[in-house]
Amino acid sequence: MPYKVNQERRHRIPKARCRVKNWHDYDAALRRRGDLTVWVTAEALEAWTPANTGRRGRPQRYSEMVVETGLMLRLAFGRPWRQTEGMLASILRLLGLALPVPDHTTFSRRSVDLTVAKAVRTATTPVNVVIDSTGLKVFGAGEWQRDKHGGKGRRTWRKLHLAVDPESGEILASELTTTEDGDASQIGPLLDQISGPIASVTADGAYDGDSVYRIIAQRDPAAAVIIPPRSTAVPSGTAETTPTPRDRHLRMIEERGRLGWQKAINYGRRSLGEVAMMRYKTVIGRRLHARTLPTQKAEAAAGCKALNVMTRLGMPVSQRIT
């Protein structure tokens, strides 16, 4: 519900029913997610063993792409490192390839300083960007243990920040931070990962602030900023000065109301960022397996890359029927 205008009578509003128009293609895409050849590509097999650099010391037996492939397999199929090792060995055996497979300790050790290749696509035309964040559990007592034995328990969380393309559903950029880092502070790092031009940036009211508008203007002066001002916001200038984008939002809200402003600027696009968050938690998981922050960052980046692979295979096209 936009701005929770119907929150009090929400229970009386029937849930909208939708029908998937491209079910045949989407059904085939869901089956292809389990195709192992999607995850172990020819590029990874060609770069399996890194070239000799000529430096002193023992050369690496496995390239970074091998560790990244194993990490993506682990997250896509929800298996621990030992079972991921066995899965990868069986794939190579079925392919008839005599390539060595890293053991689970090598996977765990090499994933600490792994730099995951970004899963973002290179944009040639201006893209609309939706930014949002969510929490991922690391460790601590679960809900059952807290209800059974009482006590708050020790819980640790990380914040996953995503920049999503609402048209394709792909994740354009991602950042994993601690809970102490604010949402607005990650606008710059997220936009820096997007190589192409930006048409608009949409986010919720937590990102409202002059610093966010300034960062977006420095990144792409032509980009539209669609962020709802706070209820206590006031115009920044006088009637004689040129109104800022935030002032124009305030003026439109005063003329049309909050709901009319949302419809006029297509603020409903922001919900697609929440859909991407839900997709990550449903497919990849609601918690992180790694214990240290650098390894957790590599895990989250690999999860976003695996999710983009699934997205490119096919997405449902829904049509509202009621």
Image (cartoon, rainbow, N blue to C red):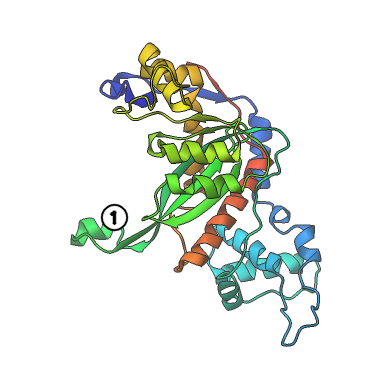
Judge the density around disc 1: few (<14), some (14-19), many (≥20) Cα neighbours within 10 Å.
few
Question: Which quarter of the rendering shows the N terminus?
Answer: top left
The spot of residue 216 in percent (x, y) is: 54, 38
The spot of residue 198 in percent (x, y) is: 62, 35
Q: Nearer the viewer, residue 42 or 117?
A: 117
Q: Nearer the viewer, residue 71 or 223?
A: 223
Callout 1 amino acid: Glu
Q: Nearer the viewer, residue 48 or 64?
A: 64
Indicate the quadrant where residue 44 lies. bottom right
The spot of residue 90 in percent (x, y) is: 69, 68
Relative vertical location of residue 54 with respect to residue 20 in this rendering, above or below? below
The spot of residue 209 in percent (x, y) is: 40, 37
Indicate the quadrant where residue 59 lies. bottom right
Query: On the rendered structure, is 121 left or right of 286?
Result: right
Query: On the rendered structure, is 234 left or right of 273?
Result: left
Outermost residue to the front: 240
Relative vertical location of residue 322 with respect to residue 178 in this rendering, above or below? above
Work out whether residue 307 can be spotted.
yes
Relative vertical location of residue 318 with respect to residue 33 in this rendering, above or below? above
Work out whether residue 284 can be spotted.
no
The residue to which callout 1 is attached is: 143
Outermost residue to the top: 255
Q: Nearer the viewer, residue 317 or 291?
A: 291
Outermost residue to the bottom: 57
Badge 1 element: helix
Relative vertical location of residue 219 with respect to residue 254 in this rendering, above or below? below
Number of callouts: 1
Query: On the rendered structure, is 227 left or right of 200?
Result: left
